[in-house]
Amino acid sequence: MNIAIFTDTYTPQVNGVTTSILIFQRELERLGHRVYVFCPTYGGREGVNPPRVFRFYSIPYRSEMMREQRIALPISRGIWEFPKLKIDIVHYHVPHYIGAYALLLAWIFRKPTIHTYHTLFVKYTHYVKIRPSLAVRFVKWISRVFCNHTDRILAPSEEMKKELKGYGVTKPIEVLPTGIDPPPLPEPSHIQEIKHRFPSNRKLLIFVGRFAREKNIPLLFDVLQILEWKGVPCHLLLVGDGPDRKRIEGEIFTRGLGERISITGYIPRSEVFAYLASSDLFLFPSETETQGLVLLEAMSLGVPVVTAAAMGAGEVLKDGRGGIAVPATPESFAEAAYRLLTDPSLYLEKQRSAKDKAKEWSSSAMTARLLSLYQTTIKEYRARRYRAS
């Protein structure tokens, strides 16, 4: 099968959408399919393109808060190569500039389309300088337009499926999370070396993700202080970077938490896994995550999770296996963390079930489901065209 992937976010950009695309791309190619990726340039940071990757010339947003994003212009040799690739299906991942190019090329060359709706965009309207209520209405409208011009929609969670139906999306919606790869187990000596970097009399809490307002990171500062008052001193490790870093660093300084919080910035994935394996608890207060892959990666290493009981992250833990999902309040997070850190039998049970849960979300199993949906969509599209002719 020849598959065209269109996305406004791809390497070298680091986020959940890029991770999802890379996992499925690798698995599809491992099975013998040809995957062509159409994505933006990143000001030369993308380096040499691998085979079958076509870049659209792009320019940066002027907004400081959106400096990681790009505006892709319809300038790419991929447009001229597209008719020669004998594409079977077009799969686009963001309802944005390149998503529009995907729909246009699919319409011109009569190809079926699938769209994965990764992001709860109504929670990201603080990035645009227009009235919030108007921004939300626009996001719902543009989402509905894109989805209803697509043959099939993939939602990473049941909550996202319900959200899209609430926008007025009428096309078929299937729930398909991204699978994960079991991360390589770090060397025990490396784990010990990391542990020695932090106070031995404090439990190590970790957050991994993009530093952005919607991630709700400052809630963890309150959790840190509440646990201290409860007699469980902890150190908080923030792994990542992003547009909200300066504000986060400023709040850490203002609250006098500099000695109890460390920030790594962006680090290689192998090192992320080493930090996860060295930690006692993974805390994730974001209420906008559509699937929460990083939760499953932490759980695969036997690290129990406390997460916000919202969207995909809450859905991962709705059965209580591997951690605890709670309302996104400092008190709820602190209480859940306190229970796990002071009850050894509960902690061990969550460790065991975390590893078991992660095994059920393998990338190979999810890719098999994706291929089945590709085949169904192609078959239905051809049947409609045959009837129409």
Image (cartoon, helix red, strand yellow):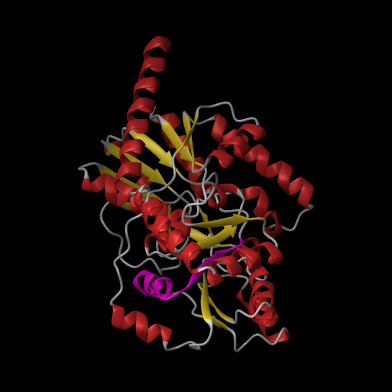
Whether residue 275 appears in magenta in the rendering, the answer is yes
Where residue 358 sits in the image (x, y, percent)? 38, 53
Q: Quadrant of residue 229?
A: bottom right
* Residue at the spot 54% in from the left edge and 44% down from the top edge: 95
Numbered marks: total:
0
Q: Residue furthest left?
A: 32
User: In the image, is 63 to the left or to the right of 100?
Assistant: right
**Where's the N terminus, which quadrant?**
top left
Which residues make up the magenta segment?
Answer: 267-285
* Residue at the spot 67% in from the left edge and 48% down from the top edge: 122
User: In the image, is 191 to the left or to the right of 153?
Assistant: left
User: In the image, is 87 to the left or to the right of 322?
Assistant: left
The relative height of residue 266 versus residue 303 in the rendered view (above or below) is: below
Whether residue 36 appears in magenta in the rendering, the answer is no
Where residue 228 sits in the image (x, y, percent)? 65, 80
Where residue 157 sits in the image (x, y, percent)? 52, 42
The relative height of residue 310 versus residue 101 in the rendered view (above or below) is: below
**Where's the C terminus, which quadrant?**
top left
Which residue occupies the foreground of this view, 319 or 271? 319
Where residue 327 sits in the image (x, y, percent)? 67, 55
Work out whether residue 216 can be spotted.
Answer: no
Work out whether residue 314 can be spotted.
Answer: yes
User: In the image, is 221 to the left or to the right of 95?
Assistant: right
